[in-house]
Amino acid sequence: EAGVAQSPRYKIIEKRQSVAFWCNPISGHATLYWYQQILGQGPKLLIQFQNNGVVDDSQLPKDRFSAERLKGVDSTLKIQPAKLEDSAVYLCASSLMGGNTEAFFGQGTRLTVV
Amino acid sequence: KNQVEQSPQSLIILEGKNCTLQCNYTVSPFSNLRWYKQDTGRGPVSLTIMTFSENTKSNGRYTATLDADTKQSSLHITASQLSDSASYICVVSATHRYPSGGSYIPTFGRGTSLIVHP
């Protein structure tokens, strides 16, 4: 079974530039999550989708971050404009239905803002 | 506010030794608690999951315990191996009702960085 795919693996941009990350979840998984993991910290949930609907985006900085999951499958996370403090690993995860089902993580995209 | 605190922040042990990692939480209403292992440069991978009624769960050399009364969990690693070097993250999930239906909100701890030396 293929895992959660993310791209790119690494990205370096200047502050105030825009960047987009892509995630392809495991086939059949209804729930998709985006996490931000700053070095030395645990992942922080940014947004959670159930199919193509948003169920939690309370910690998403909506003035600069946006995410969509068209057709309830792939998802993109965008940052515009980027700030230095956005430097982190962005992890995508998916699970069958949320709840007690296990979330499987991708390898993440490491973003460096200079 | 839901919080998950882990200790120690980092730990260095010799290969073959045992160790125990701690997790204290204030998450409500409690749904489940998972321990994840995160290798450097990789996404987290689930080791164990426990619900309210479970107090011990094993996965090979990993044994997790849960005391729902004191809101504490521990992860015990037996006969450590070099490949156990990783970050171990405690994740506690709360049930939540959204207008669109039920779901759960995971709260991640900061993790314990374990280094196993030969």
Image (spheres, rainbow, N blue to C red):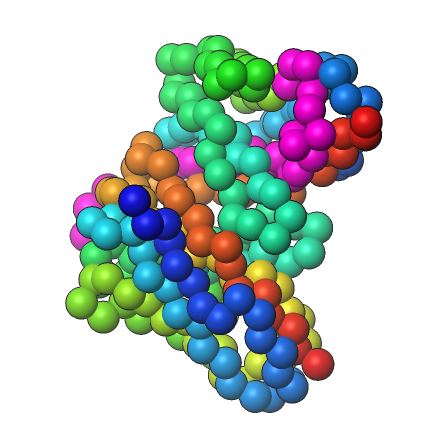
Q: Is residue A45 magenta?
A: no
**Viewer-side residue, B54 vs B59:** B59
Question: Can residue A58 be seen in this snapshot?
Answer: no
Q: Could you tell me which residue is drawn at 36 percent across and 36 percent down?
A: A102
| Residue B115, quarter of the rendered image | top right
Task: State the residue at coordinates (65%, 30%).
Answer: B84
Position of B66 with respect to B76 (left or right) is: left
Q: Is residue A70 left or right of residue B43?
A: left
Provide residue A98's location: percent of width, then percent of height: 30, 42
Q: Which residues are magenta?
A: B77-102
Q: Main secondary structure of the magenta part?
A: strand
Image coordinates of residue A53 in percent, x first then y, are 23, 61
| Horizontal relation, residue B7 to residue B42: left or right | right
Picture quarter with the C terminus of chain B:
top right
Residue at 62% x, 78% y is: A12
Q: Is residue B72 above or below residue A75?
A: above
Q: Position of residue B41 (x, y in %)?
A: 61, 53
Instruction: Note whether B41 is above or below A74 in the view shown.
Output: above
Residue drawn at 52 percent across, 43 percent down:
B44
Q: Is residue A1 above or below residue B61?
A: below
